[in-house]
Image (cartoon, helix red, strand yellow):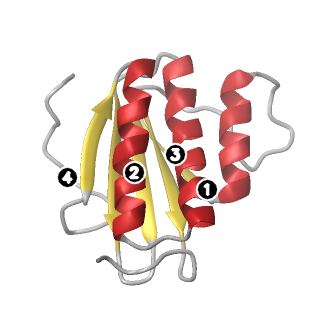
Amino acid sequence: MRTPTPRTAGPSTRRPDLDTWVAAAFQLADLRRDLHALALRFQLSDDDAGRLLFAVGEVVTDALVRDAIPVRVRWYSGATSVRIRVDEAAGPHDDPGDRRRRRGAAGAALWMAHHVAAVTLVHTGPRTTTHVSFPAGSCGRAR
């Protein structure tokens, strides 16, 4: 795993509740465990926690399939929302909301995540950032 680089900009001005790196498929289990623990801490319903784990898992798996490693995953929470930021070391790929996207495993993962969460892609140079958001009504409060 690489050492995280200093943060210059992000979805929140405060530190993330989770900041971890994934570079191989075997690390997905640990990521899911950490995300599930935070979902419980923030009192997400079982359905919302499952949607969050599915959406983030698909986005991270998509990056691993495309060999866009390492992948940095950060959880930011506010009073009314949860946002997971996934930064990968690869360039642009298909918009998850574009039905005309090409067929293939990598594009399908983002398309599936798009159905259970608000998914936004941000392309900056050679990197891609994906935001997976759960707005008000989909999250609880931290215990």
> CB of mark 3 within 8 Å of CB of mark 1?
no
Residue 89 drawn above or below residue 43:
above
Question: Please, what is the three-letter code of the amino acid marked with disc 3?
Answer: Val
Q: Is residue 95 visible?
A: no
Q: Which residue is mark 4?
A: 8
Label whose residue precedes the other's in the sequence (2 or 3): 2
Question: Residue 19 appears at what percent x and percent y?
Answer: 25, 47
Q: Which residue is mark 1?
A: 51
> CB of mark 2 within 8 Å of CB of mark 3?
yes
Q: Is label 2 or label 3 in front?
A: 2
Q: Which residue is mark 3?
A: 56
Kindly state the secondary structure of the residue where label 2 is placed. Answer: helix
Residue 46 drawn above or below residue 32:
below
Q: Which residue is mark 2?
A: 35
Label whose residue precedes the other's in the sequence (4 or 3): 4
Question: Please, what is the three-letter code of the amino acid marked with disc 1?
Answer: Arg
Q: Is label 4 or label 3 in front?
A: 3
